[in-house]
Amino acid sequence: MIEGSGSTVPRRMLGRQLRQLREAAGVTVTQACKTIEVSAQTMWRLEGGQGVKLKDIYIKALCELYRANDDDTAALMGLVQETKRTGWWHAYGDAVPNYFDLYLGLEESARKLTLFHLALLPGLLQTPAYRRAVIWGAYPGMPTVDVERRIEIAAKRQKRLREPRDRFSMNVFVGEAALRYPIGGPSVAAEQLRHIVEISRSATLTVRAVPLSAETALPLIAGSFTLMEFPAHPQFTEPPVVYVEGYTGALYLDKPSEIDQYKSACKAIRSAALDEQATRELVLDIAKEYG
């Protein structure tokens, strides 16, 4: 069972395998829909790993239609049970935007994260004061109680940084500009930078800065993103996913060509970045500028 994954990853695994079985069996979407008496839209959501109500009898019927062997059928039925679990963040309701609910499920089950942030520091590294300033900057009218609920969510997410490295690791690359923007004012920014230096010594985490003096343009072209890689599953392993967040929503990219392109971007960013010690020195120098 995938610990802490909510239903996100099992749903994606289930949908992908059902689609592959259907295509291998030469069964059309129309035929599959008729078998379990659902609409084409519902079938599209099911195969796409979206939130649809799953009944055991539906999946068994599809496995029979697709002539799945006993092992594959048993594995898929196991995934159906995993989809019925909920993640801890579901208790926060409306405090989690719909597009971010999917991200939290993926982040919670990821084995490795590689992040590149150009302008803002990643949520997993943010102090409460910095996070508070970011939220109010984006949503000036948000009630304090709702802001604090989002702070709680961030704190729960950050617990992953205390996991053993064989279960979770995170490589963070930040543009120097992200370190220099005084979000929340000088004292908040200075506290945030000192926190980065302290947490960067964790065995789970590496933090490296891409200096303004870097001559390669690729980091600027690629923009901010998160590459998520997942642990092996006994039957089906979730392929990597790239998450790109925008002001009004987010993109989830998982085509092999897209993943390869972002992995190439990671190599270029890694080559342009300072090493860990030089990054700590830069961060401390900037913190001193704030007093």
Image (tube, rainbow, N blue to C red):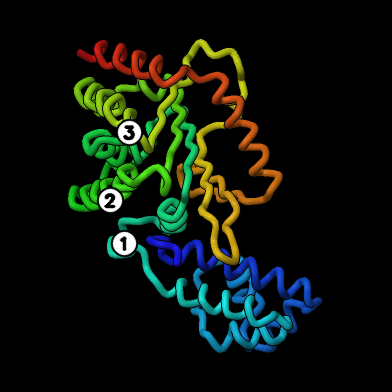
Q: Which residue is found at the position 62% from the left and 84% from the top?
A: 38
> What's under tag 1, amino acid-wise?
Trp
Q: Could you tell me if residue 99 is visible in this image?
A: no
At 51% across and 76% down in the image, what residue appears?
78
Q: Which residue is mark 1?
A: 88
* SS label for mark 1: helix
User: What is the residue that sits farthest to the right in this orientation?
Assistant: 26
Q: Position of residue 166 (x, y in %)?
A: 42, 46
Earlier residue among tags 3 and 1: 1
Callout 2: SS: helix
Please name the residue shown 59% across and 66% down the image.
235
Looking at the image, tell me whether mark 1 or mark 2 is earlier in sequence order.
Answer: 1
Position of 199 with respect to 42 (left or right) is left
Q: Residue at x 35, y 56 (%)?
A: 96
Q: Nearer the viewer, residue 157 or 68?
A: 68
Task: Report, in whole angstroms, how far the alpha carbon at label 2 lies from the one at label 3.
Answer: 17 Å
Badge 2: how crowded within 10 Å, few (<14), some, or many (20+)?
few
Relative horizontal placement of residue 186, taking residue 70 as reference (left or right): left
Residue 189 quadrant? top left
Vertical relation: 169 (above or below) 41 = above
- Disc 2 versus disc 3: nearer the observer: 3
**Image coordinates for residue 185, horizontal then vertical, percent:** 23, 24
In terms of secondary structure, where does tag 3 sit? Answer: loop
Q: Can you identify the residue that label 2 sits on?
A: 156
Asked if the residues shown at circle 2 and circle 3 are in contact, with their CB atoms under 8 angstroms apart, the answer is no
Residue under pointer 3: 202
